[in-house]
Image (cartoon, rainbow, N blue to C red):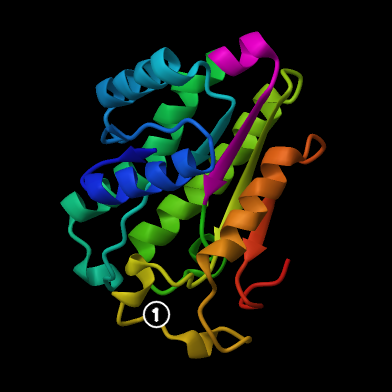
Amino acid sequence: MNYRERAAAANAVCGEISGMGRKAIAIQADVSVAAEVRHMVSEVEAHLAGIDILVNNAGIAHPRKLEEIREAEWDEVLTVNLKSVFLVTQAVVGGMRQREWGRIINLSSVAAQTGGAVGAHYAASKAGIIGLTHSCASSFVRDGITVNAIAPALIETDMVTSNPNANPNVIPMGHFGSVDCVASVAVMLAMNDYMTGQTISVNGGWYMS
């Protein structure tokens, strides 16, 4: 369980996992920084063995109109949301290739498909994740590694509930989605060996593909 600042929350999740008889460790790392990613991966490999399933879900959102986005803010959102996916994937794919098995699941967003409710910087970062997913899926398809993306919309998390522009009325179903709705798709993608390069939308009917 990777975390950047919320150690107590990460350790609580590890406690739940341990309570089910599984091994779990919490590792602090900013996954937008290559050196910290390398340290995180080495710690996981030392304590739990190779990484077979990777979920790239680090993300930040600063709601802004286009004309309000500062260059530094643009760079921060692209670095945290998109560069982190590249860095962590690059760090683990060698081991997956050696074992000839891997599942990489990237968290994109409906913002990549519709523009969303955060801003151009966020939408661009999430659209980039879909492009990166396609590239990696094509590159790893003969290595036993699948790479897919999930594109949620207005899931009831701290990020969404703190965004004044996030209104459940834009969702045809009329309400925010639950974290479990996304988690169940991630589990499905981890189990499936014949899906790669796909983006699964979990959005209450906001965007239909």
Q: Residue at x 37, y 31 (%)?
A: 25
Work out whether 138 lies above or below 97.
below
Q: Is residue 117 visible?
A: yes
Q: Residue at x 53, y 70 (%)?
A: 178
Work out whether 39 lies above or below 110.
above
Q: Is residue 6 visible?
A: no
Q: Position of residue 58 (x, y in %)?
A: 38, 46
Q: Decide whether residue 96 is among the magenta residues.
A: yes
Residue type at mark 1: give it: Ala
Q: Residue at x 65, y 62 (%)?
A: 201
* Pick the front one: 8 or 185: 8
Q: Residue at x 37, y 15 (%)?
A: 42
Residue carrying label 1: 166
Question: Which residue reaches farthest right?
Answer: 194
Left or right relative to 207: residue 176: left
SS at circle 1: loop
| Quadrant holding the C terminus | bottom right
Work out whether 178 lies above or below 91.
below
Q: Position of residue 118 (x, y in %)?
A: 36, 70
Q: Decide whether residue 206 is among the magenta residues.
A: no
Q: Position of residue 60 (x, y in %)?
A: 31, 55
Mark 1 surroundings within 10 Å by alpha-carbon count, few (fewer than 14), some (14 through 19), many (20 or more): many
* Pick the front one: 115 or 202: 202
Q: Position of residue 17 (x, y in %)?
A: 48, 42
| Quadrant holding the N terminus | top left
* Pick the front one: 117 or 161: 161
Left or right relative to 15: residue 54: right
Q: Which residues are magenta?
A: 95-107
